[in-house]
Structure formats: structure tokens, C-alpha cells
Amino acid sequence: MITCFGATLSFAQDTRGPLDLPTEIQKAVDTMSQELDLNDQQKTDLNQIYTDFFSDLEEEASNNDGNIDDATLIRMNNERKAKVRSVMTDEQYGKFTKMKEEKIEQLQDQYLKDMENQEGMEQENPTEQEQDMMEEEEMDDQE
């Protein structure tokens, strides 16, 4: 699955069971609200942006046998990012960008620690969540 809030949060399904996307989006917006001091209109707008983004991803994947090509994914991420940017003040967006970078770094550090802890075991690929975060970072770097 694709990362939603850059590195802020990811919606990869975990071992707790099926994903409740509306609830996860609301949790993510609530977290951003606390960190970025969002007003009610910004929270509403961000919730809608991410709801639409995931709906569009789902539709795109269902129209293409479950796959989304890189160009389409980059385009969709850029559109989402522009919408998010338009909702936030310069200060909020700066903090948001910093939060994403820190989250990516944390995920990468955790992945490396996990690999180090698997002594004698063959290194595995990053989890889907970690891979999504790294791919989005690469997409952000391409801009």
C-alpha cells in the first residue's frame, strides 16, 4: 500500500487485522493537528484530501489488475502533495516536511537495527511499509 502522509504515517496493514481507512486517516489528521496546530477547516480539508487520494489509488489499482505504474503513482503523489501544501501555512508545511524526514529516518534506523538483530539470518527485504516510505522519499527527491 502507499504511504499517505509522507513519512508521517503509513497505512500498511499490520498484524492487528483489516485496515479501517477512515479511522486511520482521522488518526493521522489528529496527529498532524497536534503537531502543526491545524484549524478545523484545515483538518477537514486534509481529511478529504487523503480520503480522495486513497479512493483514487484504489480505483486506479482496480482498473489495472491491482497495479499502479510508477508514472501514475508519482503524478498522484504530486497532486496530493500540492493539495496538502495549499491547505497549510508556510510554517506548518515546513514542520510537516521536517516530520516526514524524521519519520523516514526513524523507519530506516529501525529497519537497520532489525537486520542487525537477525544474526546469522539472511537479510530480508524491507517491510512493505518501510519500502513505501523509502519510495516516497525517492519521489520527493525527484521534484
Image (cartoon, grey):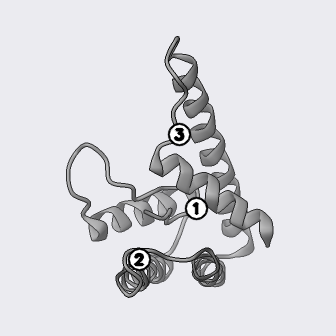
The quadrant in which residue 106 appears is: top right
Figure quadrant of the C terminus: bottom right
* Residue at the extreme top: 120
Q: Nearer the viewer, mark 3 or mark 1?
A: 3
Residue 2 percent coordinates (x, y)? 48, 65
**Along the viewing direction, whichever of 126 and 104 lies nearer the viewer:** 126
Using the numbered discs, state the Cα–Cα distance from disc 3 to disc 1 in whole angstroms. 20 Å
The mark nearer the N terminus, 3 or 1, is 1
The quadrant in which residue 6 appears is: bottom right
**Along the viewing direction, whichever of 16 and 95 lies nearer the viewer:** 16
Residue 23 percent coordinates (x, y)? 28, 65
Report the residue at 49% width, 66% height from top: 4
Report the residue at 43% width, 62% height from top: 1
**Residue identified by numbered label 1:** 6
Density class for disc 3 (Cα within 10 Å; few <14, some 14-19, many ≥20) is: few
Report the residue at 79% width, 68% height from top: 142
Q: How many marks?
A: 3
Using the numbered discs, state the Cα–Cα distance from disc 3 to disc 2 in whole angstroms. 25 Å
Q: Relative to residue 66, is residue 49 drawn left or right?
A: right
Q: Secondary structure at mark 1?
A: loop
Report if the CB atoms under discs 3 and 2 are less than 8 Å apart: no
**Along the viewing direction, whichever of 35 and 83 lies nearer the viewer:** 83
Density class for disc 1 (Cα within 10 Å; few <14, some 14-19, many ≥20) is: many
**Residue identified by numbered label 3:** 125
**Along the viewing direction, whichever of 40 and 116 lies nearer the viewer:** 116
The mark nearer the N terminus, 3 or 2, is 2
**Residue identified by numbered label 2:** 54
The mark nearer the N terminus, 1 or 2, is 1
Using the numbered discs, state the Cα–Cα distance from disc 1 to disc 2 in whole angstroms. 13 Å
